[in-house]
């Protein structure tokens, strides 16, 4: 295609100067015609040739850079797993055909980037050929057999399906390595939007309400399906292309004997989980309440001042409200909106209900009642 363009350009230059493009002299034409070229024609031919030459060089450079980019991409960091000879038959198991078509070798050759490290493993953004991107979670300290993991992941991948849950697409099991493959959520996490160092755009009130409803619906579906999440926190609330909130890392607790409780997670955990290390539906609701408090206050549950003297986010809110400083509780970013104070107070009451008692499905209905008051139509700043 490039060469065709160069040839057409060259022919057009030659024709414009009155020269035979085929390079064959017409027997009927006198040789004087060649000698009769003016200085202007000669200069035009020379300039045209130089321009075509430069164009050809630029095109060749561009074509050369393309494989260099691909090679650089292939030379990036990769996933490393220990594959023993007797395990070479182990394959990447997909739950649905047609969604993705790559194999384990392609995944291992993909360029990867660390997204985050959590209590159950490390998540990587894997960029395969043809602009395909997925998330690979490398699990650590899995305590179940291959068959047990197969049963659990089959349920998560084939049975548990909801628009507010990040879909599990595939898994891999070997003696030393266990992988899970999820869709890549390009919108990032709630943690980054609320507490990230590169936070630039404030999270508007109506968006916070939508996040509360979406997360509540996803969690409610898990509980109705008899699944405990066990790790509800802002970094596990992700945003897809439609900017709707989805829950990730659900249903993984049964794969581990006694998962660690990192300090960054403690602010979300119910007191009974910290004491007995056993997650329940009630502890999930507690974590959801802490998430709502984070949306309302803009504070991280692990914020250093809150952790002083054993004060967590729910206790700080309780103490502040008890002194009738309710306005001091809310994120300063929310104070620029008109006519939302009543809605904020209602959502605050729901959040405090979650962290104090065991709510039922009515909690989700209460949040939806708040949104019906016109919040989704926007408020004046």
Image (cartoon, rainbow, N blue to C red):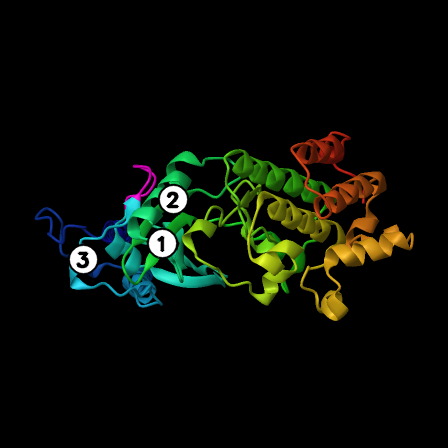
According to the picture, the residue beneath numbered tag 1 turns out to be: 144
What span is in magenta? 94-101
Task: Measuring from the top left, give residue 131's x and y in whole percent.
Answer: 36, 51
Q: Is residue 303 left or right of residue 35?
A: right
Label 2 secondary element: helix
Q: Residue at x 31, y 66 (%)?
A: 80
Which of discs 2 and 1 lies nearer the camera? The answer is 1
Q: Is residue 182 left or right of residue 48?
A: right
* Numbered badge on residue 88: 3
Q: Residue at x 39, y 39 (%)?
A: 155
Task: Measuring from the top left, give residue 314's x and y in whole percent.
Answer: 75, 54
* Numbered badge on residue 152: 2
Label 1 secondary element: loop
Which of discs 2 and 3 lies nearer the camera? The answer is 2
Q: Residue at x 18, y 53 (%)?
A: 89
Task: Measuring from the top left, give residue 290's x and y in whole percent.
Answer: 68, 51
Query: Between marks 2 and 3, how big is the CA–CA gap?
Result: 23 Å
């Amino acid at each position: 295609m490039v060469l065709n363009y160069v040839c057409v350009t060259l022919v057009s230059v030659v024709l414009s100067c009155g020269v035979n493009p085929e390079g064959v002299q017409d027997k009927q034409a006198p040789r004087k015609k060649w000698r009769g070229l003016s200085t202007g024609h000669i200069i035009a031919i020379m300039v045209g040739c130089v321009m075509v030459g430069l164009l050809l060089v630029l095109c060749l450079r561009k074509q050369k850079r393309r494989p260099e980019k691909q090679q650089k991409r292939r030379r990036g960091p990769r996933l490393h797993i220990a594959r023993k000879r007797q395990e070479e038959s182990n394959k990447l198991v997909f739950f649905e055909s047609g969604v993705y078509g790559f194999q384990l070798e392609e995944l291992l050759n993909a360029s990867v980037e660390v997204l985050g490290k959590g209590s159950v493993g490390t998540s990587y953004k894997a960029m395969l050929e043809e602009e395909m991107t997925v998330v690979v979670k490398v699990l650590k300290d899995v305590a179940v057999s291959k068959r047990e993991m197969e049963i659990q992941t089959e349920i998560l991948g084939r049975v548990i399906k909801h628009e507010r849950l990040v879909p599990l697409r595939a898994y891999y099991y070997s003696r030393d390595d266990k992988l899970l493959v999820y869709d890549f959520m390009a919108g990032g996490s709630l943690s980054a939007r609320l507490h990230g160092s590169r936070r630039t755009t404030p999270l508007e009130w109506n968006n916070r309400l939508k996040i509360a409803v979406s997360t509540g619906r996803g969690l409610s579906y898990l509980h109705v399906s008899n699944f405990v999440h066990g790790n509800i926190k802002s970094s596990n609330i992700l945003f897809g292309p439609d900017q709707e909130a989805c829950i990730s890392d659900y249903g993984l607790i049964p794969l581990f004997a006694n998962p660690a409780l990192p300090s960054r997670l403690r602010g979300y955990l119910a007191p009974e989980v910290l004491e007995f290390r056993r997650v329940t539906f009630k502890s999930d609701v507690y974590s959801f309440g802490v998430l709502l408090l984070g949306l309302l206050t803009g504070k991280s549950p692990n914020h250093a001042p809150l952790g002083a003297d054993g004060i967590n986010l729910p206790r700080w809110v309780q103490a502040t409200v008890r002194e009738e400083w309710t306005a001091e509780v809310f994120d300063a970013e929310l104070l620029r909106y008109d006519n939302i104070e009543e809605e904020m107070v209602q959502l605050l009451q729901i959040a405090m209900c979650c962290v104090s008692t065991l709510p039922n499905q009515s909690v989700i209905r209460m949040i939806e009642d708040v949104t019906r008051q016109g919040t989704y139509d926007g408020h004046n700043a």
